[in-house]
Amino acid sequence: MADSSNKFELVYRRELRKIEKIFSKIFVKSNPQSVYEPINYVLQGGGKRIRPFLVLSSAHAVGAEFKDVSNAAIAVEILHNFTLVHDDIMDKADKRRGRDTLHIRNNVDTAILAGDLMTALAYNSLLKDCKNNSKDVISLFTKGVIEVCEGQSLDKDYELQSDVSIKDYKVMIYKKTAALLEMCCLLGATISKGKPDEIKALGNYGKNLGMAFQIQDDLLDIAADEKNFGKKIGGDLVEGKKTYLFLRALEKASGSDKELLLDVIRNKGIDKSNIDKYKLLYLNLGVLEDAQKEVIIYTNKAVSSLISIKNNYDKDLLKWFALTLLQRNK
């Protein structure tokens, strides 16, 4: 098993290097530099490149080669980074992946324009891999854009609402995070003309992987090492976000503990100086363990979805990827 893990790690790193190489030069000579240089800054910021890898590995799982969907893989990463640029403006975030966010480094106007252009550039890249089924491919991609924007809107709405349930939260994270990972898997398989059962299986894999990823992101926001995480710990509490941990804590708390949590809603967030107090509350209520269990449940669902994938190598690669994300610390 260790040998297989090492083999899959090498595959992932190899494709990651190819993606980084493309992003190191993709828009370097494009003009005007006043907008393309900021775009390059964003795209060269690193990251796990989960979304392009899902496009590539899903295509491979239905019999295509990585190169057959390389432009689509680049397209989804450009799209993802567009959402981060605009989310950071809305969230007033000053750090992303350990670097200044674009609106801090440049200014808000530049960040908005760069994000707008990145959307068009993503479509431009996607079109290069569209074959006879271009309508289906573009529809999938567009649905992903719509879902992620709706998810971000719900996320901001929930900051102002006092009666958000865990069910509401899961609808929001499906749209904001899971739908995009689902789209990546569907995209790779659809461009590569996979069979209907294969496409459905890969879509379910991406959806459940996305749910696990976002709940784990919520968990890491309070439990991760700040140097590894690349941004301030406790940001969700400061912004008053209704994460899985917060909503689960609200369900379990009583008395003064519940009042402390209700203060987050009443005050629309907390002061940074109180982050440790709320982290201790989460620990005492056991919600960190609850969140970890949810992550494991969705990860197992993702892996179970792969039953229709006939090629054991590709099935094992996707399983390895899901379990690797389960163990991440940033």
Image (spheres, helix red, strand yellow):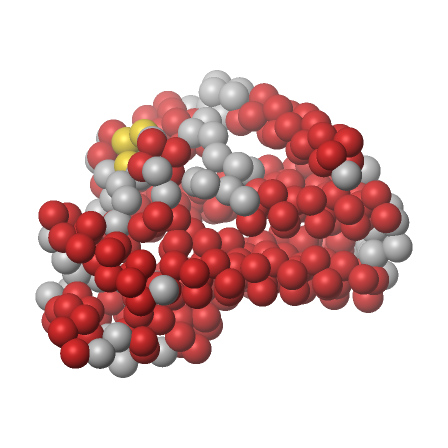
Which quadrant of the view contains residue 186? bottom right
Q: Is residue 319 left or right of residue 150?
A: right
Quick one: quadrant of the C terminus? top left
Residue 50 in picture, x, y percent from top left: 57, 43
For residue 191, above or below residue 252: above
Q: Is residue 233 left or right of residue 137?
A: left
Judging depth in this view, the residue of 311 and 146 nearest the camera is 311
Which quadrant of the view contains residue 141? bottom right
Judging depth in this view, the residue of 277 and 94 nearest the camera is 277
Residue 106 in picture, x, y percent from top left: 24, 30
Rendered residue at 28%/44% (across/down): 233
Rendered residue at 60%/43% (across/down): 324
Q: Is residue 234 left or right of residue 7?
A: left
Rendered residue at 73%/63% (across/down): 305
Judging depth in this view, the residue of 301 and 163 nearest the camera is 301
Quick one: quadrant of the N terminus? top right
Rendered residue at 83%/51% (across/down): 62
Can residue 288 be seen here? The reply is yes
Residue 212 in picture, x, y percent from top left: 53, 58
